Image: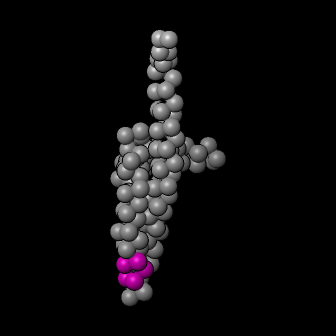
Amino acid sequence: MLRIIWVISIHLRNFMRRYMPTNILLDAIRTRRGLKWGVPAMLLAIPYLFAASTCTALIDGGASRWLYVVALVCIWNALKFIVIGPVSAVFLLRCKRAEDRARQRSMPPPVPAPA
């Protein structure tokens, strides 16, 4: 039984990684070229929080309680985008520092001036 649950969770994770738009975008942000887009991507949390707010307002107005699932997914996606901003900024700083160190190591030593 545990093996079946394990295998299902692996397949579900792989499906979510490949086909869900937020996961695709977050994977693109985690690349070296995409790190600069982490902080602006935090703004994508606003529409997700608005959608979650709208879902809960609809539920209070008498809509199906299944909208709580949609609201939960929207809140989870908003949290992912809020977290990726500072994380990508830290990773970008680390990459820049490592690139600077590598560039300094590859530079030839200065030639002393003739006396």
What residue is shown at x 46% (from left), y 55% (from top)? 85
The residue sitting at the bottom extreme is 61
Q: Where is residue 33 in the image (x, y as percent from the top left)?
A: 37, 40
Number of marks present in the image shown: 0
Q: Which region is colored magenta?
A: 53-58
Q: Which of 112 and 37 is in front in this view?
A: 112
**Colour scheme in the image?**
one colour
Q: In the image, 33: left or right of 96?
A: left
The quadrant where residue 32 appears: top left
Q: Nearer the viewer, residue 53 or 32?
A: 32
Q: Where is residue 111 in the image (x, y as percent from the top left)?
A: 47, 15
Q: In this view, does 41 lie above or below 1?
A: below
- Tell whether position 1 is magenta: no
What residue is shown at x 35% (from left), y 68% (from top)? 47
What residue is shown at x 44% (from left), y 64% (from top)? 78
Q: Is residue 58 above or below residue 16?
A: below
Q: Is residue 61 above or below residue 103?
A: below
Query: Would residue 105 be visible to someone looking at this image?
Result: yes
Q: Nearer the viewer, residue 34 or 7?
A: 34
Q: Position of residue 58 (x, y in %)?
A: 37, 82
